[in-house]
Amino acid sequence: MVTADAASRLEGIIGLALGAQALGYKDPAGLDAFLADADPEFVGFGVEGAAMGLFMRSVKRDDADALAAFRAGPWGCYAALVYAGIGLGMGELHVPVEPFVAEAGDVMAAFTVDGYGFHFGLNAPGVHLQGQPWPDGVAGDMGRLFDVGLARSLWFGSAADPAAVVAGVSLFAAERRDDLWAGIGFAATYAGGSSESGFALLLDTAGPSSPSLAAGSALASYVRTQCGNPVASTDAACQRLTGLSTSSAHALCAATAGEDVSAGGFLAWRGRMAEGL
């Protein structure tokens, strides 16, 4: 069942992201005040939307300086969400994502592909969320990261209804489900909206993909704490899905980090998290 609170929560998140996206594209000077006024629990989604708008501005208005300034400013510590927002913009403008990730030299740039997948899943669920093959131009490690974003879009599109999420994951081939469950773990922990019974259903259904579900949750906790932005809902989800507190999950992610900053290096890092859980 979807509760009214969960639906309202996710609608508010999307509204904040869209508002920040519009400002990023039209009036970057207003972003600092807009984000400073946002609920601290959800401000990361505003950062994601802002980065999407700023990326679109850089392409359509030939203004790369605004995005560069945003990344160098106080919101730049939300690196994963900035990259995810850039990926959303790439999806909107049909810009190839792989060259950007390859040139970034930053392991968190993998979230660009996550954002790219989120865009396609949220905007064309009938085309991308029914177990279809990866779209043209997406393959290998890029495809695996794309699936993480698809799963995040499934969480939002299902309004955090665990039964609908489980049904959605089941439509995909078994070899894709580890990455999908990692995306569900991330969304359930960072965005929230689930109940105790919902967490139980996710854990029971994930089965052999439970370590990936847990790794996604731990990674969400890591992203939260990078900017000193932990919240009670994240800690509760992390405790339930990983058995660790937010701070302990952060420590695990930090301890398992490697030197390979490629997309494959990111996936290997997540694999080490899963082994640690």
Image (cartoon, rainbow, N blue to C red):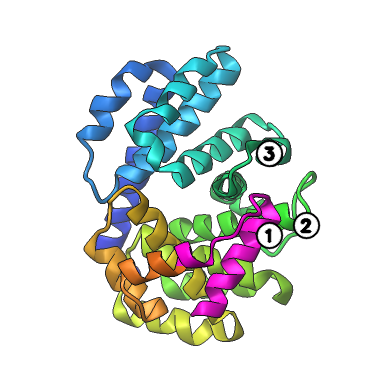
Span of residues in magenta: 253-277
| Residue 168 seen | no
Tally of numbered tags: 3
Direction from residue 275 to residue 143 in the image, left or right? right
Labelled pair 3, 2 in contact (Cβ < 8 Å): no
On the image, which quarter does residue 29 sit in?
Answer: top left
Give the answer, above or below, for where 238 lies relative to 203: above
In the rendered image, residue 271 lying in the magenta stretch gets the answer yes
On the image, which quarter does residue 171 sit in?
Answer: bottom right
- Which residue matches tag 2? 140
Number of residues whose C-alpha sits closer than 10 Å to that of mark 1, classed few (under 14), some (14–19) or many (20 or more):
many
**Is residue 67 or residue 257 the one in the foreground?**
257
Q: Position of residue 182 (x, y in %)?
A: 54, 67
- Residue at image position (45%, 44%) is 81
Q: Position of residue 199 (x, y in %)?
A: 38, 78
- Which residue matches tag 1? 144
- Which residue matches tag 3? 97
| Residue 234 seen | yes
Determine the secondary structure under disc 1: helix
**CA–CA distance in space, label 2 to label 1:** 7 Å
- The residue type indicated by label 2 comes to Gly
Q: Position of residue 13 (x, y in %)?
A: 33, 47
Give the answer, above or below, for where 145 lies relative to 236: above
Quadrant in the picture for the N terminus: bottom left
Labelled pair 2, 1 in contact (Cβ < 8 Å): yes
Give the answer, above or below, for where 209 lies relative to 78: below
